[in-house]
Image (cartoon, rainbow, N blue to C red):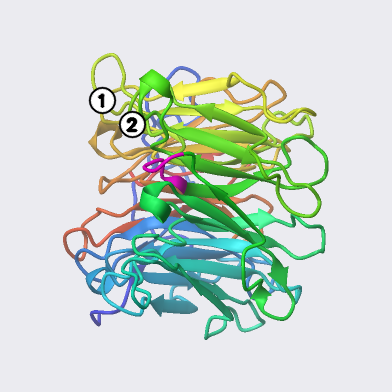
Amino acid sequence: MSPTQKKTSPSRGLKRFLPLAGAALLGLAALTLPKAFMGRTPWWVVGANAHDRLGEKVFTAGDVDGDGFAEVAVLSSGHARNAGRIQVFRGSKRGPSREPSFDQRGEAEADQYAHSFGSVGDVNGDGYGDLIVAAQNFNAPGALDAGKAYLYRGSPQGLMLPAVWTRMGTTAQELFGDCSGRAGDVDGDGLEDVVVGAYGFQESRGAAHLFLGSRETGLSKDPVWTALGEAPGDWFGYSVASAGDVNGDGRPDVVIGAKMARQGALGKVGKVYVYHGTGKGLSLRPSWSAVGEKVYDMFGWRALSAGDVDGDGFSDLIASSYGHDGPQGPDYGKVYLYRGSPQGLLSPPSWTYTGEGGGWMTGHSIGSGDFDSDGFSDVLVGAPGAGGNGKVLLFRGGSQGLSPIPDLLLTGEGGGFGSYVGFAGDVDKDGFPDLLVGAPSFSEVGGGSGKAYLFYGAKDLRSIRSPR
């Protein structure tokens, strides 16, 4: 095997992993299964070199080639002395391809290319999904760590080079693009729009920008909307994402996290903001906000649409505080669900989940999707410190909201399993969305080479097999 090759599993049949060894949680659907249980084996890929940290982020690339199968995107943040690398694997009936169809690296060492990436839908109206990728530590002329974002357009051949659109930060340590993703069609022109964060802007006050889709250039040259954090050190824009349509007005909304925002005497607890769509753009002021409970909770580390977990027609929101401390130690982590309504998001949260022990870091990553195709969105929660090997918990949606205890528990092989979880789309087109998990510290080729997994969605959650 050459030094640049990745080792991947076949999409079916390889008996590399043991069947699911579920935890003894009351009501848990992922019970311990007999060795003969014929669940479908996960797909996986490992980093090519020590310190590649493959799997630090994993997410769907959307359907970039128009064949009806979703593609999978995987980040190797440490590749080539932190230049960074993104690989996209094509979907098929057999699952993701063995070799990447798109493989791109950062322009220079320490760029941290692909530290943020995401499917942004069809921004130019050509019928193919597009992908945004950012290099948060890219050095612009006269501005160290200004950051740079790249847009790659889809085509029948997949993602095309060179990038059809790029944008650099303008100030040092701006970290433009550190988080970026799909905003939805906020101006109603039929083209998807993109939100880009720059949490280092103005001494880490932070900023978030909205760029409109364009048939000619992919995205608008300049942002049509910008929001700033309330104070230096807030890290506003550390997380940015679509919030779905939380008030049911037919216009997409956007959520932005400021994980170090202050709240009076409580100190740096973190804050999450939602901006409603107006039909022409986004509201100038936040329509809703919530704050963390304790100092250094880092509330807003992650915040995104949960989909419609209760089937009431309104999008719900999930946010996490992986630094939330518990009764016997630090970093239990906590996740919160806020329900949508005609008035927008409702407070207090309708559902919360706290990690079971210190160091679990519950909510280090979160995701959503209808993984059993029952019409209710489900929520994924990563806890990379749980039990030493890391865990991923899945909570099913239903008419009463999310289940109070996990319906599925995946236990990892170590390496920070659950550091990132993501919605994969329907990679094999079987009618059930699939889920992705990253373990960036996993060591197979060398220390910290990293590993990413795809678990196939199913009507019966017990058929989803754990790597342990």
Q: Which residue is mark 2?
A: 323
Which residues, given as a range, are shown in magenta? 231-237
Residue closer to the observer: 344 or 381: 344
Above/below status of 446 relative to 166: above
Badge 1 marks a residue whose secondary structure is loop
Residue 330's disc number = 1
Give the CA separation, mark 2 to mark 1.
Answer: 7 Å
Look at 37% across and 33% down and name the residue there.
322
Q: Quadrant of the N terminus?
A: bottom left
463 falls in the magenta region: no
Tell me which secondary structure the magenta stretch mostly adopts. loop
* Residue 275 sits in quarter: top right
Query: Contact (CB < 8 A) between labels 2 and 1?
Result: yes
235 falls in the magenta region: yes
Q: How many marks?
A: 2
Q: Residues within 10 Å of mark 2 (few under 14, many from 20)?
A: many
Left or right, 466 with reference to 244: left
Give coordinates of residue 443: x percent, y percent: 21, 57
Look at 80% across and 37% down and name the residue there.
248
Above/below status of 410 relative to 143: above
